[in-house]
Image (cartoon, rainbow, N blue to C red):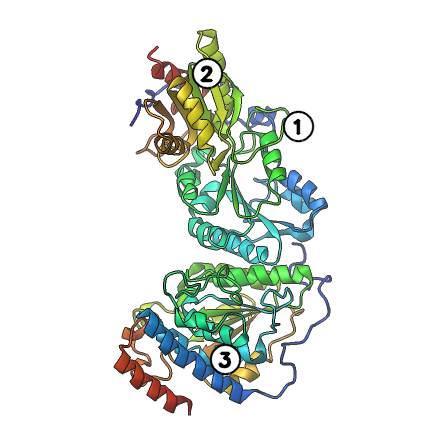
Amino acid sequence: MPDAPPAFRAPLPSDPASWDMAASERLANAAVAGEVLADLADADDRIVVLTADLKFSNRTVDFERRHPRRFLNVGIAEQHMVTMAAGMATFGYVPYVATFASFVGLLCAEQLRTDLAYPGLPVRVLAHHAGISLGFYGTSHHATEDLGLLRAMANMTVICPCDAASTERALRTTVDHDGPIYFRLGRGREPDVHAPGAPAFEVGRLATLRDGGDLAIVANGVTVAPALAAAEQLATEGVEATVLDAHTIRPFDAETLCAVAARSGRLLVAEEHNVVGGLASACADALVDGGVGGVRLARAGMPPDEYALIGPPTHLYRHYGLDADGLAARARALLDR
Amino acid sequence: MPGNRTTDPAAPAALAAGAAGAAPAPLEQIRRRAAIVRNETLRLIEVAKSGHYTSVFSAAELLAALYSGVLRLADDPEWPDRDRLVLSKGHVAVGVYPLLAEHGYIPAELLDQYTRLGNPLGDHPDMRRVPGIDFSSGSLGHGLSIGVGMAQAARMRGYGSRIWVLLGDQELNEGQIWEAAQAAGHFGLGNLVAIVDRNQMGLDGLTEDVMTVEPIGDRFRAFGWRVVELDGHDPAAVWETLTAVPATDTTTPTCLVAHTVKGKGIGYMELSRTWHLGYLAPPDATDAARELEGFHA
C-alpha cells in the first residue's frame, strides 16, 4: 500500500458543512434527480421511476407529483425493484430505480449483474447517499464497496457526479444510452462545483477542472469540491495541482489519466470508497496497463481494513482525510514537502 | 401509482382470453409435443453430457400446452403484443428449445450442437442469443419479479399480452418470490399467471424435507392471488386450466399449482433425488428412449 492514511484529527467545531440540518439546508440542493426526470418525462413517455419506500429521501416524489401514473413505489423490496425494472425495460420503458446505494449497489449486486447488465437493458440506478454520507447511521447504510462490484460488470456504465449541475447533465446526456447505468450519488446536499448550465457532460471522459504541473488529484462525487479546495491551498504554497473529475468510473478514461500522471509522476486519488476496488484501483489498473512507470500513487479513501467510525458525515470526511486539509496534507507528503 | 388496485383505464377492453379462445382442445398435439420435449431432452443432454432431465420431464405437458395454443404468439418472435413466458426455473430450457425450433423461432440444426462452444443454446436460456426466449434466467427467485415488471408495463402500454411465469416449487424458498407476489397483488396484475411446477422435489430431496414450501395455495392467496390446482401431467386438465385464466384487464393475478412428478416418464428417475442433474451414457439413453416410447404411447 502507498502512504499511510493520516492520524486521527478532531473535527473542527466551526465546520460549516456539518451534519446539522440548518447548515445542511444552506448547501446547494443537489437532489435534483426527481425534477430532472420529471422534465425529461414531459417529452419522453419511456421514462418511469421506481423507488423502495424512500421517495422523500431521494426526491422521486418530485417526479410522482408530475407523473403519478409513471411512478411505482414497490415498498421495501429493493431486489424485486431492480428485477421488475428489467421486466419493464423489455417493453421499451427506460426505468429509473432509486434507493440508498448500500441497498442497491450491495444488496442487489446479483440482480444488477444478472437482470440488467447481462441482458444489457436500459435501466438506470440512482444509488444515492453513497459512500459514508449517511454518517452516524452506520455501516449498514454506507456503501464503500459498490464501485468495486460495479467495475467488474460487463455492459455496466458507472457515473458518479459531484454536484447538482453534474447530476442534471449526466441524467440528460444519457437518456438514450443503450445499456444499464449506475449513478452513484451523494446525499443531495453537496456544494456546487459547476455552475448550472456548465459545458456538456461527456460520459467516459475525465474532466480537467484545474491545471498544474506538480501533481494531479483525481476525485469524484463528494471528494471533488475538497480536491479543488486543497489545490487552492497548495497554490498558496507554490504547488500547482491538476484536478480531474473522474465522474465516469466505467468505462474509465485510461488514456487521459496516463497522460496526466506521466506529466508529474505524482497522483493523489480521493474517493468516498474503500481504497480497494474503486477509483484508485481504476487509476492503478490504467497506469500498469498503459505501461506508465514511476508514478507515485497515494490513495485517500476508506482504509482497506476499516468500517467507518460513528460520526456526522463531514466529521468522518475530515477524520479519514477526505476534506481539503486532509487532501492537501496527503499531497504534501506525496511531494515530500 | 395511485389506485393501484384498479384497472388502468388506458388498458384496452379484454383481448382474447388466450390465443385458443373457444377452439377445441388440441390434446393430440399436446401429447405429441410433450413426447418431443422428453425425447429431445434425452437427445440433447447426450450431447451436453450433463443436464436437468427430471425438471423438464415434470413440466413437459405444461410446456407442450403453452406452445400448442395457450401462448398468444406470432411468427415474429418480437411481436410486441405477444404473450411472454418467463422461465423462472431456467434449467427447464433444454425442454423449451425443441419447441422453439418447432415453432420456427430457431433453426433445428442448432439443437444438434446444444451447449457446444459458441452455440446459443445453454443449460440456462439467454434472451439475447435465442429468439423466442423472453428473459434470460437461471438464478432462481428472479422470474416472478420480471413477470411483474412485464405485466405492469404491458398494462401501461395498453398491450393485451398475458405474462406467464414458470416457477419451480423449491424455488419458492427464495425471498424475492414473495416480494414479487406482494407487488402483483398490490398492483392488481390480472394479466400475470404464475405456474408452479409442483414436482415435489428440490436438489437435495423432497421439498418438505429440504425447506417447506406448503401451503403454496394459501401463501399466494394471502398476497391477493387467485389459486387453481391441477394435474400437471393430464393434457386435458392442463389445457382446460390454462385456457380458463381470467381476461388480461382483470385485477387478480393467477397462480396455477400444477401437481407433477419430478422425472415423470422414466420410472427410476421419478422422485429420485439423485437425478436432479445427470447424464445417461448411450446404452442407458437408448433404454430410456424405449421407456419413453412406452410412456407416450
Amino acid bearing label 2? Ala
Q: Secondary structure at mark 2?
A: strand
User: Mark 2 falls within which chain?
Assistant: A
Return the residue nearer the eye: A253 or B95: A253
- The percent position of residue B88, horizontal first and vertical second, equals 46, 65
Disc number at residue A241? 2
| C-alpha gap between disc 2 and disc 3 | 68 Å
Q: Which residue is mark 3?
A: B64
The picture places residue B20, in percent across and down from the top left corner, at: 62, 81
Q: Disc 1: which chain?
A: A
Residue located 43% across and 20% down the image = A216
Amino acid on which the number 3 mark rests in the picture:
Ala
Question: Does residue A125 lie above or below A169 as drawn?
Answer: below
**Disc 1: which residue:** A197
Q: Earlier in the sequence, mark 1 or mark 2?
A: 1
Q: Please tell me whether mark 1 sits on a helix, a strand or a loop.
A: loop
Residue B253 locus on image (x, y percent):
58, 69
Locate residue A169 relative to residue A260 in the image: left or right: right
Task: Identify the image quadrant of residue B260.
Answer: bottom left
**Residue depicted at x 54% and y 55%:** A86
Chain that bears disc 3 = B
